[in-house]
Image: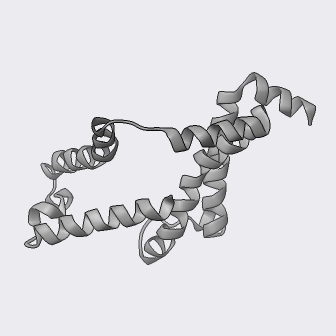
Amino acid sequence: MKTIRDFIKRHPLLSYFALAFAISWGGLIMVVGGPSEIPGTGGRYETLLPIVGPAMLLGPAVAGILLTGHLYGREGLRHLFILVRRWRVGVRCYAVALLTAPLLATATLLALSLRSREFLPIIFTSDEKVTLVLMGIVGGLWWASSRS
């Protein structure tokens, strides 16, 4: 066991990525029931996505907390949670953080829609654009508030 501790202390970044990967994919495999049960399409995919998504997203956060505790002890964890609560950034940083993924996804779908209309974002084909945007904002705010 001492050799594993020494390895983690010598290679914390590698250990973090390995642990995050193991927790994320281990969570996915446990939820779906094994590697052969990972669905690619169909109704089972839609049924499992609300469970599998959070299980996979927990990997990096849990790995960070575990390794911080392992490497720096209680004092490191206390310092980590103090920094998380004190972290403040400007409006531009929030805009970049919140808009990068939707804008990149839209740009990618628009580029793909040149090959096939199947990829055209629904906002361009919907008659209820305002409702669609409002529901997206409400859903995003609900999801974000449930995570804090």
In the depicted structure, whether residue 60 falls above or below residue 43 = above
Residue at 53%, 61% in the rendered image: 54
Q: Position of residue 28 (x, y in %)?
A: 60, 60
Q: Closest to the observer: 115 or 54? A: 54
In the image, residue 40 above or below residue 2:
below
Instruction: Name the outermost residue toward the left.
Output: 127
From where the camera sits, is residue 34 visible?
no
The color scheme shown is one colour
The residue under the point 27% across, 45% down is 99
Q: Is residue 139 left or right of residue 12?
A: left
User: Measured from the top left, where is residue 2 in percent x and y?
Assistant: 92, 32
Q: Give x and y (percent) for residue 78.
A: 69, 41
Q: Position of residue 50 (x, y in %)?
A: 48, 69
Q: Quadrant of residue 139?
A: bottom left
Give the farthest residue toward the top. Answer: 10
Horizontal side of residue 31 vs 145, given as left or right: right
The residue shown at (41%, 64%) is 143
Residue 27 in view:
yes
Between 85 and 130, the one lying in front of the other is 85
Question: How many marks on residues?
Answer: 0
6 vs 90: above or below: above
Quarter in which the N terminus is drawn? top right
Q: Nearer the viewer, residue 5 or 74?
A: 74
Residue at horizontal 15 percent and vertical 50 percent from the top: 115
Residue 92, by quadrant, is: top left
